[in-house]
Amino acid sequence: SIEDLAQLIYDLHEVNLGAQVSVKLVAEVGIGTIAAGVAKANADVIQISGHDGGTGASPLSSIKHAGSPWELGLTEVHSMLIQNGLRERVTLRVDGGLKTGYDVVQAALLGADEYGFGTIVMIAEGCIMARICHTNKCPVGVTTQNEALRKRFTGTPDGVEAFFRLVGEEVRHTLAQLG
């Protein structure tokens, strides 16, 4: 219930006064009403996750056809929070398949304050999306504690840095086109 969530958020704030409490919601019809309750429960961040994305740690059957596009969820949440005078109380974060600078600009126009990149950053780091993270047998050593497999990891921060530089460049280019 929202009351239980409010108590949990309160307790988390009491344990660490400087911490921001984030509540993740899957984009779905009716998410706006739930987000309004989460904002009233004093969450600092509402994270809206779209249907396109998910982690390699999840079985494929768990991430396919779950939820709606983040664009629909974000639009509904942003509108509902404005209607209820709650928009300024929370930070809206969106994730679930963001891959480009255009996605960032679109999310900003729809009301997002922050943007989460997951799968695409893992790929930039060297992940091959084997989808067996949870087995501790990652063939490229990204998500394992097995020392023999960890030695296979050849990723460097350079790939991730290059990816985000390209995203930033595309954001600048898109904003320039908009005027």
Image (spheres, rainbow, N blue to C red):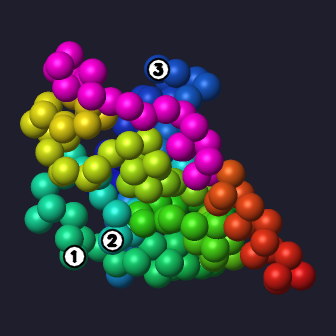
For badge 1, the amino acid type reads His
**Mark 2 vs mark 1: which is more N-terminal?**
2
**Mark 3 vs mark 2: which is more N-terminal?**
3
Seen at 21% across and 76% down, the residue is: 65
Residue 87 visible? The answer is yes
Which circle marks residue 159 in the picture? none
Q: What range of the chain is rendered magenta?
A: 145-164
Marks 2 and 1 sit apart, C-alpha to C-alpha, by: 7 Å
Instruction: Estimate how packed mark 3 is, as few (under 14), some (14 to 19) or many (20 or more) residues with alpha carbons within 10 Å.
Output: few
Instruction: Estimate how packed mark 2 is, as few (under 14), some (14 to 19) or many (20 or more) residues with alpha carbons within 10 Å.
Output: many
Seen at 19% across and 37% down, the residue is: 138
Q: Which residue is mark 1?
A: 65
Seen at 40% across and 78% down, the residue is: 69
Marks 3 and 2 sit apart, C-alpha to C-alpha, by: 33 Å
- Which quadrant of the rendered structure holds the C terminus? bottom right
Seen at 13% across and 34% down, the residue is: 137
Q: Which residue is mark 2?
A: 51
Instruction: Estimate how packed mark 1 is, as few (under 14), some (14 to 19) or many (20 or more) residues with alpha carbons within 10 Å.
Output: few
